Image: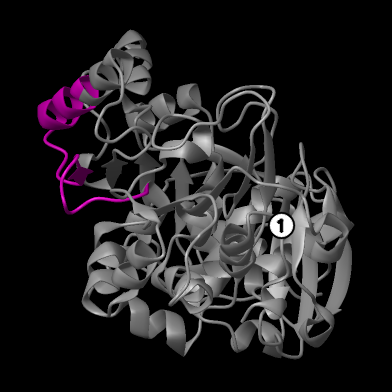
């Protein structure tokens, strides 16, 4: 019997062949954290170890509240700066025009590499699976221990295979596909599993689209989600890679899976996740006409250049009917969208373009909701109170659907306005 992706990568890290459900101790290639670095550093100090095991393995990217919207955020930022400076850790991305949302920036900077093991103190660390990385979110205490010891134990996850054929039709995006998968699998349908995306449908997708798929792996309970590393990935990381110790690994054709599903992309239509869970999926027709107060385009799920361009396709020469907030996922994305005129199109349409960061996604700032308000968002979570008041409502959708809805002031099918 062949091996799965998770068995190959964790076996490589452990130094011996492993099988699903074994517990292994491995040294992470990189450890990512963000604004929660302050609290993690406090736990690290309580352990009693003065120095991290390898300062070159720590990556800290401030993004959840940038610039700091409160004194609490400012304190966390200060603690992160002092800790990284004190440890002599070079990979610190402060509140500057070189930062961005942690998961976007981590990949842009060449830390997400095929065959490596990455842990992050954020649940959407699984995004890096788009590069063939075994990437998993962990807790703050676990991260402090990993900084101190250079090791973490993991159970080798069972694997879930999703075969994807066909091509997406115009007006339909990778976000629509993964929302459909979420609706089918449900929020606990892949608990502690390694979700592998296979097939020609995935090969045809861009790296950005694959990042969208893997980003939402955690929303079905997965430990990690991953796509096969190919020429598109190799081209992306060339010249960016922060390590030479990587290897393109993938599952064997005869690997054993605990669960499997198949999809034809040509049958996918625009969809939404209705309040208040990510797996509350519905075709856009069933939500058409729901009045919205705000539209939000951005986040680690859909704040990349392709996403902003999709929104601009809809809004070019038109005017948004409701407040529409656009937040590029990084300053690299921001600059690219500025150079090619995408930001001009969005601004002319009435959108407010903010600096890269998480902002309203977690209800921090730059677009929190009032009681009774409804937002349609390209983010990855729509839990009660996620974007502000607990009596507000969040629908998740693709950048195309969000832009179409912003144009009309109600949830709309992008195919009707393109």
From the top left corner, tell me how far across and down residue 64 is, in percent. Answer: 38, 35
In front here: 372 or 161? Answer: 372
Residue occupying the point 21% across, 39% down: 55
From the top left corner, tell me how far across and down residue 49 is, in percent. Answer: 27, 17
User: For mark 1, what is the residue?
Assistant: 411
**Residue 274, above or below 301:** above
Q: Residues within 10 Å of mark 1 (few under 14, many from 20)?
A: many
In front here: 366 or 94? Answer: 366
Please indicate, yes or no, whether residue 8 appears anywhere in the rendered image: no
158 relative to 399 in the view: left or right: right
Residue occupying the point 58% across, 83% down: 205
In front here: 39 or 89? Answer: 39
Q: Total number of numbered labels? A: 1
User: Which region shows up in magenta?
Assistant: 78-101
**Residue 139, above or below 177:** above
Residue occupying the point 64% across, 75% down: 173
From the top left corner, tell me how far across and down residue 342 is, in percent. Answer: 34, 74
Q: Is residue 275 magenta?
A: no
Q: In the structure shown, which secondary structural element does the residue marked by tag 1 occupy?
A: loop
Coloured how? Answer: one colour
Choose top left, top right, bottom left or bottom right for residue 328.
bottom left
**Residue 73, above or below 45:** below
From the top left corner, tell me how far across and down residue 9 is, in percent. Answer: 56, 63
Please indicate, yes or no, whether residue 215 appears anywhere in the rendered image: yes
245 relative to 290 in the view: left or right: left
The C terminus sits in image quarter: bottom right
Q: Is residue 80 magenta?
A: yes
The N terminus sits in image quarter: bottom right
250 relative to 268 in the view: left or right: left
């Amino acid at each position: 019997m062949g091996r799965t992706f998770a068995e190959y990568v964790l076996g490589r890290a452990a130094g011996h062949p492993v099988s699903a459900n074994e517990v292994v101790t491995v040294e992470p290639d990189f450890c990512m954290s963000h604004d929660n670095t302050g609290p993690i550093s406090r736990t690290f100090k309580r352990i009693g170890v003065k120095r991290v095991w390898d300062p070159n393995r720590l990556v800290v990217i401030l993004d959840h509240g940038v610039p700091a919207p409160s004194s609490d955020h400012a304190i966390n930022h200060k603690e992160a700066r002092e800790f990284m400076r004190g440890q002599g850790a070079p990979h610190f991305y402060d509140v500057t025009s070189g930062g961005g949302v942690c998961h976007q920036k981590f990949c842009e900077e060449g830390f997400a590499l095929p065959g490596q093991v990455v842990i992050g103190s954020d649940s959407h660390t699984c995004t890096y699976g788009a590069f063939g990385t075994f990437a998993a979110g962990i807790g703050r205490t676990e991260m402090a221990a990993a900084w101190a010891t250079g090791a973490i134990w993991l159970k080798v996850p069972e694997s879930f295979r999703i075969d994807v054929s066909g091509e997406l039709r115009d007006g339909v995006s990778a976000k629509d596909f993964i929302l459909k998968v979420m609706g089918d699998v449900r929020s606990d349908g892949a608990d502690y599993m390694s979700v592998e995306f296979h097939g020609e449908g995935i090969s045809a997708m861009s790296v950005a689209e694959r990042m969208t798929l893997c980003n939402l792996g955690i929303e079905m309970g997965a430990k990690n989600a991953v796509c096969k590393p190919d020429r598109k990935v190799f081209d992306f990381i060339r010249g960016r890679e922060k390590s030479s110790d990587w290897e393109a690994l993938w599952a064997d054709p005869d690997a054993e899976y605990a669960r499997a599903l198949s999809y034809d992309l040509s049958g996918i239509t625009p969809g939404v996740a209705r309040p208040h869970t990510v797996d509350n999926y519905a075709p856009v027709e069933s939500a058409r006409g729901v009045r919205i107060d705000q539209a939000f385009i951005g986040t680690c799920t859909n704040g990349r250049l392709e996403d902003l361009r999709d929104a601009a396709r809809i809004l070019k020469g038109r005017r948004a009917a409701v407040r529409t907030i656009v937040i590029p996922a990084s300053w690299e994305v921001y600059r690219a969208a500025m150079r090619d005129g995408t930001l001009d199109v969005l601004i002319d349409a009435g959108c407010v373009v903010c600096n890269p960061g998480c902002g309203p996604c977690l209800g921090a700032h730059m677009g929190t909701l009032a009681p009774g308000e409804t937002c349609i968002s390209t983010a990855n979570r729509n839990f009660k109170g996620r974007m502000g008041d607990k009596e507000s409502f969040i629908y998740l959708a693709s950048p195309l659907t969000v832009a179409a809805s912003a144009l009309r002031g109600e949830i709309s099918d992008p195919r009707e306005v393109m």
